[in-house]
Image (spheres, rainbow, N blue to C red):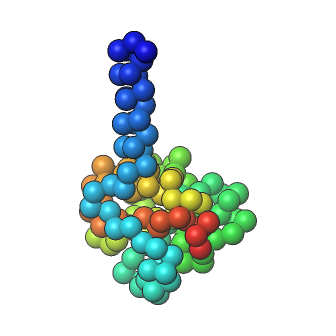
Amino acid sequence: MELIQYVLIGAIIVFAILKIKPTAGVRQLTTTDLKQELSDNSKQFIDVRTPGEYKGRHIKQFRNLPLATLHTEAGKLSKEKEVVVICQSGMRSNAAVKKLKKLGFTKVANVKGGMNAW
């Protein structure tokens, strides 16, 4: 293989790792942890799946705020309260907590495994 191919493969691997790596400063919750926190009114629970996925099955404490609209809808969330994010598998919610951190939210949590683990 030529050097350029190794560099390209290396860049793809690094990109993939960065996409799935948990974000620094974000709590990673198991579904067991989540069950213990669902009654905490000081937290905001958001489900970043599509409206169709949300309607099919959701946890009642979570409100639907699709990932595609999160950037424009984040103003509906309080930066003072922790935001707990869930999706189907944990991938979109991980992307969502990264977006929230960039938007200045300091208290964010991702539900590992998402609804698949629920």
The answer to which quarter of the image holds residue 14 is top left
Residue furthest front as drawn:
1
Residue 29, percent from left and from top: 42, 72
Q: Quadrant of the C terminus?
A: bottom right
Vertically, is 25 above or below 92? below
Residue 24, percent from left and from top: 28, 57
The answer to which quarter of the image holds residue 25 is bottom left
Q: Residue at x 51, y 53 (%)?
A: 92
Vertically, is 63 above or below 11? below
Residue 103, percent from left and from top: 31, 51
Q: Residue at x 37, y 43 (%)?
A: 18
Residue furthest right as drawn:
56
Residues 91 and 76: in front is 91
Would you say 99 lies left or right of 68 here? left
Q: Residue at x 53, y 46 (%)?
A: 68
User: Can residue 10 be seen at all in this image of the molecule?
Assistant: yes
Residues 21 and 25: in front is 21
Q: Residue at x 54, y 78 (%)?
A: 61
The mark tally for this picture is: 0
Would you say 28 lies left or right of 63 here? left
Q: Quadrant of the N terminus?
A: top left
Vertically, is 61 above or below 73? below
Residue 58, percent from left and from top: 64, 71
User: Can residue 73 be seen at all in this image of the molecule?
Assistant: no
